[in-house]
Image (cartoon, grey):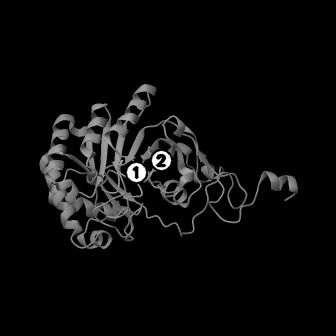
Amino acid sequence: MNDQAAAAHPVVLDKFQDPDWTARGERRARVALRALETLWFNTGTLCNIECRNCYILSSPSNDALVYLTRAEVEGYLAEIARDGLPIREIGFTGGEPFMNPEMIGMAEAALEAGHEVLILTNAMRPMMRGSVRSGLADLARRFGARLTLRISLDHWSAEHHDEERGAGGFAKTVEGMRWLRDAGIRMAVAGRTLWGESDAEARAGYARLFAAEGFDIDAQDPGLCVLFPEMDEGAEVPEITESCWGILGKRPDSVMCSNARMVVKRRGETAPVVLACTLLTYDRQFELGRTLREAARPVALNHPHCAKFCVLGGASCSG
């Protein structure tokens, strides 16, 4: 490579270091925001349990992301209305969202603004508090199927689920799901692909469980029974270049950051910020600004999760 070519195509020694160039000196793929259809709010990283493979290291002691408030959520809802953004779904994730004392109020604000609401929960003790159950029942009566709770049920068997979440976790989560069933609250499930099953085998196992429990969840619907690939930052994965779209037969608008953003509030900071992705919570290069307008710029796929989870794994956190 001559000096002119080297200047145009710098070689980076390690992967996922430069937002513009791969380690081999190829143009890194970027994803433009096609349309903002899903806005996520991370309600805080505190959780009632500590899972073995938590995507963002939530635990009873991790407060790196602090609790959002209803007022902060309403600020973004006002921006959506003012700018006529095409948001269909507002998602709430954590941590465990129902540890946030304003979770019911935040969901109410999003529903009153006319959006569909998706809340990710382990359906354990925080959700089963009396005040939370009465709040959820009220929202379900008022807004019906526009409210969905996606339950973290890592596997259809107690044995494997409890490997991830601790002994007795499966029974507690299923107890919460039974309450949601009886309250008429719409449910979905999120599972994991840790155990080497085929997609068909995993869905058949979930289908048996749903049928036995009378849960109105279609295990064959990937939007209602989401099976997430595992993420390992140490795993060897290829970088995604501009030419990969044609090689893989994929389009940039199939990737989650083409249609979604996430709002977080970091410990010690005075205001929330908008991130490119729900999974890259701690990497500051994916922090795009304080407003949705500022966060509308393209995203460089400069992280192993971009490759393994989204482009190659084809996963999305949205329902």
On the picture, is 129 further left or further right than 317? left
Find residue 106 and report its image quarter. Answer: top left
Which residue bears the numbered disc 2? 256
Marks 2 and 1 sit apart, C-alpha to C-alpha, by 8 Å
Q: Secondary structure at mark 1?
A: loop
For label 2, the SS is helix
Q: What crowding class fits label 1: few (fewer than 14 Cα within 10 Å), some (14-19), or many (20 or more)?
A: some
Where is residue 141 drawn, in percent x and y?
15, 37
Earlier residue among tags 2 and 1: 2
**Amino acid under disc 2:** Met
Q: Residue at coordinates 49% horizontally, 40% vertically from top-left?
A: 290
Residue identifier under label 1: 317
Q: Amino acid at mark 1?
A: Cys
Of the pair 108 and 161, the residue shown nearer to us: 108
Q: Residue 117 appears at what percent x and percent y? A: 30, 41
Q: Which of 153 and 134 lies nearest the eye of the viewer?
A: 134
Residue at the spot x=57%, y=41% of the render?
Answer: 32
Q: Is residue 222 left or right of residue 268?
A: left
Instruction: Evaluate if marks 2 and 1 touch, with contact meaning CB atoms under 8 Å apart.
Output: yes
Name the spot of residue 133 as percent of width and height, x first.
Answer: 16, 49
Residue 281, position as x, y percentages in the image:
47, 55
- Residue 55, relative to residue 262: is it above or below? below
